[in-house]
Amino acid sequence: MRLHKFLSRAGVASRRASERLIAEGRVSVDGVVVSEQGTKVDPAASLVEVDGERVTIGSPEWILLHKPPMVVSTRSDPQGRQTVYDLLPPQHQGLFHVGRLDVMSEGVLLFTNQGDVARDLLHPSHGTERRYEVLVEPPIPPDLRGRLESGVELEDGPARAENVTTRRTPDGTRLVLELTLREGRNREIRRMLRAVDVHIRRLRRVSFGPIELGKLPAGAWRSLSVEEVEALKTTGQ
């Protein structure tokens, strides 16, 4: 395994930041400082150190959290709000969160110690599907579905949804949009719907790639199965 990938997989830094660590002479392999970016290591046998501290790759860990609203997707919050890490047990406190959901949104949020795989999943070139259910308030433009699928102009460029479907709530008073995005831009759905004058009542991510929220209660988490992890890695390739 290439050294920068090893460091990223171990959770030290991103691949690019790991390359900087190597260039700065802060990484050693088997007691020898390394400066060559293409250096390869044996994860099971090589002694890798950063600033004199040994670095190892633990067993892959992936968990799914059903993020509730009013919880922030950060490790800490200067305003003292509850964070997603407050919902996890101590043994999972060191995991990366894969992307994020804004404070009012809820649903699927993944965590892992495989930072390189997470970054591949989030990279726009992979187009990982994210499926959402959005409860919206009337009035609803008659051409809403077409406008979302054809694209809405935002300040950072056009954005479009795929596979937009609609259904009414049981009482018939509100509309639920079911849509898929392949980008992960900040507050993308909220900005798209604001651009077409639609008010959001509730926004929930129900899947990320092949991982489905299912009936996992809000605030609860579960470990992903081996099959789910393999499906995620295939998605990120």
Image (tube, rainbow, N blue to C red):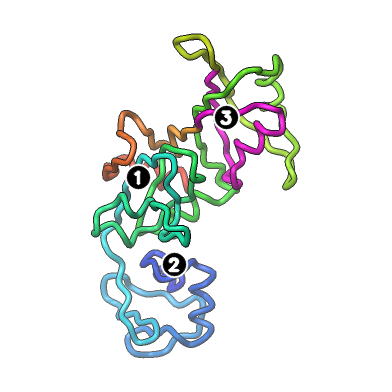
**Residue 209 percent across, percent down from the top left:** 45, 38
Judged from the image, the secondary structure of the residue bearing numbered disc 3 is: strand
State the mark number for residue 5: 2
The answer to whether marks 3 and 2 mark residues whose Cβ atoms lie closer than 8 Å is no
Q: What are the residue bounds of the magenta stretch?
A: 175-202
Circle 3 residue: 200
Residue 237 seen from this side? no
Quarter-of-image position of residue 49? bottom left
**Residue 219 percent across, percent down from the top left:** 32, 41
* Closer to us: 148 or 27: 148
Dot 2 amino acid type? Lys
**184 is within the stretch colored magenta:** yes
Q: Quadrant of the N terminus?
A: bottom left
Q: Is residue 49 above or below residue 13?
A: below
- Give the mark nearest the N terminus, 3 or 2: 2
**Residue 165 percent across, percent down from the top left:** 56, 19
**Distance CA(mark 2)–CA(mark 1):** 19 Å
Circle 1 residue: 230
**Distance CA(mark 1)–CA(mark 3):** 34 Å
Q: Is residue 37 above or below residue 73?
A: below
Q: How many marks?
A: 3
Dot 3 amino acid type? Ile
Residue drawn at x 35%, y 54% is 85
* 10 Å crowding of disc 2: few (<14), some (14-19), many (20+): many
Image depth: mark 3 or mark 2 in front: 3
The answer to whether marks 2 and 1 mark residues whose Cβ atoms lie closer than 8 Å is no
Quarter-of-image position of residue 8? bottom left
Q: Is residue 77 above or below residue 40?
A: above
Residue situated furthest front in the rendering: 79
Residue drawn at x 31%, y 67% is 57
State the mark number for residue 192: none
